[in-house]
Image: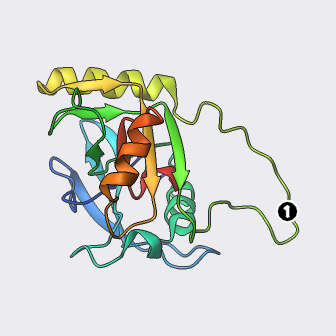
Amino acid sequence: MAQAEIGIIGGSGLYAMPGLTKIKEVRVRTPFGQPSDPYVLGTLEGRKVAFLARHGRGHRILPTELNFRANIYGFKQLGVERIVSVSAVGSLKEEHKPMEFIIPDQFFDRTRHRADTFFGNGIVAHISFADPICPELARVLVAACKKAGVVGKRGGSYLCMEGPQFSTKAESNVYRSWGMDVIGMTNLQE
């Protein structure tokens, strides 16, 4: 039986899950090494949830150092079928204001030092990434934002950069000219 059905990855500033009840911590072993932190299992509004602090408690893991494969594999071992990944991002468009939630529908990869596949070592697979975001989950997230009284916008492109430094003005201007909406350092691999 699944220990959780929904996974929540907390990014910068979200190191615990408010409202979670019946809490227990679980460490998961994966063939990819250690996840960022123990998973916190609990119940949120009647749903079994697994929460993971992406950068570890105390924000001790840089974006490039994150073991994305272990984090996702660990969720799967717990029975998770859907993941909500929360990240702090920068806006590349004036229409996206601070404290708004953007649920992107596309990604652009500007990383260069990360494992970005579960495949290799004799296992070959080619996965479509044309529509990387689940439309059903995106609708649920926009509705949840509305219910909470915050702005939730669906659609747009998330540019994932390597970090830990932020982009230069010249880089940001190029990303804007490409039509990117927000810029961050973590969501793509998740």
Where disc 1 sits, the SS reads: loop
Please report the residue visible at 28 percent of the width from the left and 33 percent of the height from the top.
93
Please report the residue visible at 22 percent of the width from the left and 26 percent of the height from the top.
95
Percent from the top left, x then y, of residue 61? 35, 76
Q: Nearer the viewer, residue 97 or 115?
A: 97
For the residue carrying disc 1, how many other residues have a C-alpha within 10 Å: few (<14), some (14-19), or many (20+)? few
Where on the picture, by quarter, is residue 176? Answer: top left
Percent from the top left, x then y, of residue 85? 38, 48
When the figure is inspected, residue 111 is found, relative to residue 133, above or below; the finding is below
Query: Is 63 on the left or on the right of 86, as rendered?
Result: right
**Could you tell me if residue 49 is visible in this image?**
no
Q: Nearer the viewer, residue 41 or 165?
A: 165
Please report the residue visible at 54 percent of the width from the left and 68 percent of the height from the top.
70
When the figure is inspected, residue 25 is found, relative to residue 139, above or below; the finding is below
Residue behind mark 1: 123
Percent from the top left, x then y, of residue 119? 75, 61
Where on the picture, by quarter, is residue 24? Answer: bottom left
Instruction: Please name the colour scheme applied to the rendered image.
Output: rainbow
Total marks placed:
1
Residue found at the very far front of the displayed protein: 170
**Could you tell me if residue 108 is visible in this image?**
yes
Please report the residue visible at 56 percent of the width from the left and 72 percent of the height from the top.
113
Q: Amino acid at mark 1?
A: Ile
